[in-house]
Image: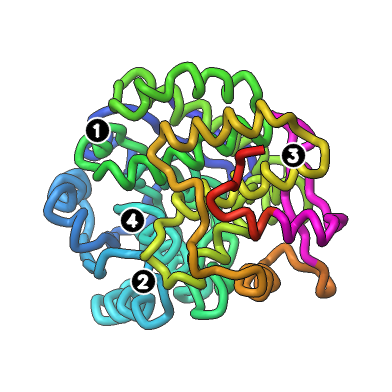
Amino acid sequence: MNTLTVDLGDRSYPIYIGTGLLDQHELYSPHIAGKQVLIVTNETIAPLYLQRVRNALSAYQVDEVILPDGEAYKNLETLNRIYDALLEKKHNRTTTLIALGGGVIGDMCGYAAASYQRGVNFIQVPTTLLSQVDSSVGGKTGVNHPLGKNMIGAFHQPQCVLADTETLNTLPERELSAGMAEVIKYGLICDKAFYGWIMDNIRALMQRDPAALAYAIERSCRDKAEVVAQDEKESGIRAILNLGHTFGHAIEAHQGYGNWLHGEAVGTGMLQAADLCWRMGHISAAELHALRDLLVAAGLPVVGPADMAEDDYLSRMQVDKKVLDGRLRLVLLKQIGEAYITSDVPRQLLTQTLLAGDKLGQA
């Protein structure tokens, strides 16, 4: 097992990465203050892992809520089912919520923890690659609104993150690809050496080589922890973690949450961002082509939805947390391994990227 730390002063917490961690009572207990625990999971994960976590927490009053699976259910209506369970079982302010699942479960459970009785503790137990390398770390929680993704939420840090890599053995191929988008993102925004390693090892990663996956998860978490430690509440540099997300969130909202997986939309969004960077002269045609090839090798889409016009993108992109005073801000690349945030994007070049269709990324 490897242990990393997200350094946030008195809100610092460990990230445990390894195999067989779900069953280890000693990893949970230091982070549970009271006697009550509510496990929040979904219909897919519950039959696979719920009992193992319950067994590890047998010393506590353990209750559970099993939610429907999918991004389509990441909304206020489903969130209320968590509050219902907490209130019906009379959970008090010392309760601890356990998010057992992927990014949707982690985000909803975290937001419930942030808002129940004005804030209670929670632990992230991510079971997908995307949640292990990204959404479980950093304290972003929330739900979607039909007009915008993650527009209702709060920053609420977990007590710990417990990433059991064995859970990836049951992960569908499409979900593995979606998670790989976020892995690739870290290389693009802040870790050029890691990006090179991913390019060299993408075949092993997609074949679920345990050593390759463990390294990718640790390196991704380390990169994210360093960024979050500098800017916990995204007032500055932390926004670089959203490379491709403004484009991707527009795709998700337009297509209907869940029709495109988050990682799929982010993968296409990163290629759109890179295409724009090439048009602005920041990266070469060869680098753009290499990214496209890498996304293809990761099983990710490299063409946006055929039914999305420029106005469809722009109207959705304006409902984005990075928009300030009506000005669209994008995360772009100065070069591979160095991202920046800008409102100064030539509209003509952005239009060319949005209308590239199946020529996207083919400079």
Residue 271, percent across and down? Answer: 60, 44
Query: Decide: marks 4, 3 in contact (CB < 8 A)?
Result: no
How is the model colour-coded?
A: rainbow
Residue at mark 3: 278
Q: Mark 4, mark 3: which one is toward the viewer? A: 3
How far separated are the C-alphas under marks 2 and 4? 21 Å
Q: Amino acid at mark 1?
A: Glu
Question: Could you tell me the amino acid type at mark 2?
Answer: Ala
| Foreground residue among 273 and 117 | 273
Q: Any mark on residue 166, and which?
A: 1
Q: Which residues are magenta?
A: 328-352
Answer with left or right where residue 233 lies relative to residue 334.
Answer: left
- The residue under label 4 is 98
**In terms of secondary structure, where does tag 2 sit?**
helix
Q: How far is mark 2 from mark 1, CA to CA? A: 26 Å
> Splitting the image into 4 quarters, where does residue 89 fall?
bottom left
Tell me the element at label 1.
Answer: helix
Note whether residue 25 is visible: no
Residue 336 in the magenta stretch? The answer is yes
Q: Secondary structure at mark 4?
A: strand
* Marks 3, 1: nearer the viewer: 3
- Tell me the tag on residue 72: 2
Which residue is pictured at 56% across the width and 30% down the height?
222
